[in-house]
Amino acid sequence: MRIVFMGTPDFSVPALKALVEVGHQVIAVVTQPDKPKGRGKEVQMTPVKIQAMEYGIPVYQPAKVREASFVEVLKGLEADVYVVIAFGQILPKAVLELPKYGCINIHASLLPKYRGAAPIQWCVIDGERETGITTMMMDVGLDTGDMLEKAVIPIEEKETGGSLHDKLSMAGGDLILSTLKKLEEGTLVRTPQTDEGTCYAKMLTKSLGDIDWNQGAVSIERLIRGLNPWPSAYTMWNGKTIKIWAADVIAGREAADFLSESGVPAETGTAPGTVVCSDKRGLVVCTGGGLLSIRELQMEGKKRMDTPAFLRGYPIPAGDVFVKKESD
């Protein structure tokens, strides 16, 4: 089959590689325009463009895929199917209707749960036990088309947004091969989505990482993992921003024993955000429910460190309080 591949970030690359390396005819790649990135604002090619160029596949980078002139370009390619994964633009009806067999999207959740822009991170933040990949026929709605196949991926106890991203990215490459094989054989079964059990994975913002210490330790620890590596969770101490990369929950009897052994006055020790321990036992903070032992953190403008190394450079006294950032 003649395939047009649409994708942009690292997440999309394994699917493109899988298609090419098993011998599918990828006649064109459509990706977002090159953009300036980093402190130097150097224009960088998208990861999908880099991979496509290595394969010698023609690359198209329309500012708006819905523009009539580009729709004509797509029409001229006469593709059998479009494979779309993290492309970054919504395809209009005029594009969706072009390929013979339609447009297949590779979505990073078990639809209909976690439709939307950031399903990977929200699964971790919400404490899900499993997630996965769904291939689906695209329609004009947002991740609402008929489901084709699913691959389930368990979420590990210390899974981060980054580690889950990589697992799902590879799973997407495997699943699209299975879906296309069944499409060619005429055995693909379409299952309409229902609205039962749906939830929307809204786009991530930097402010989402501003830790609210009134939340419970379990919720905060999930937030830290879900937003690692981007946009990252953070807190304020003495007017400086500290990113928190890893932490453990101390709850129940263990938390009560820890507080009594620490000798922190009850009236201050239970206030959310209060540092109740800052020594060889670790950096432990009181939350709205339980304690949080911070394992890895980063002072603004400095490198990531484990807690012992951090405390040698930035001794945070027990009794100090971490607070939310006032404004972004």
Image (tube, grey):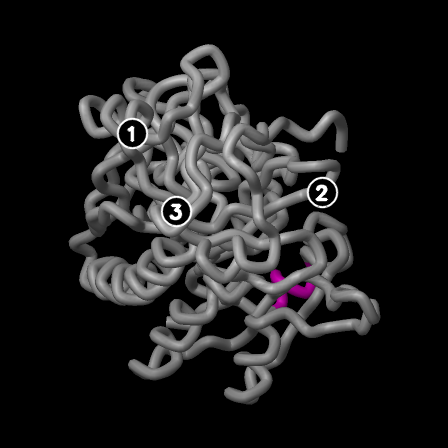
Instruction: For marks 1 and 3, give the one nearer the viewer.
Output: 1
Question: Which label sits in the foreground, 3 or 2?
Answer: 3
Mark yes or no: residue 137 visible.
Answer: no
Place of residue 4 in the rendered image (x, y in percent of width and height, measured from the top left): 50, 67
Mark positioned earlier in the residue sequence (1 or 3)? 1
Of residue 6 and residue 261, the one placed in the foreground of this image is: 261
Q: Position of residue 167 (x, y in %)?
A: 31, 60
Q: Which residue is mark 2?
A: 240
Type of amino acid at the residue the image marks with label 2: Lys
User: Total number of numbered labels?
Assistant: 3
The secondary structure type at the circle numbered 2 is strand
Quadrant of res 74? bottom right
Residue at x 49%, y 45% (from the top left corner):
227
Q: Amino acid at mark 1?
A: Glu
Closer to the camera in the image, 268 or 143: 268
Main SS class of the magenta portion in the image: helix
Residue 122's spot in the image, x, y percent?
Answer: 42, 36
Q: Earlier in the sequence, mark 3 or mark 2?
A: 2
Asked whether, in this view, residue 93 is left or right of residue 249, the answer is right
Quadrant of image for the C terminus: top right
Of residues 121 and 197, the one nearer the viewer is 121
Q: Which residue was labeled with disc 1?
A: 261
Asked whether disc 1 touches disc 2, contact meaning CB atoms under 8 Å apart, the reply is no
Residue 258 location (% of width, % of height)? 28, 30
Is residue 62 in view? yes
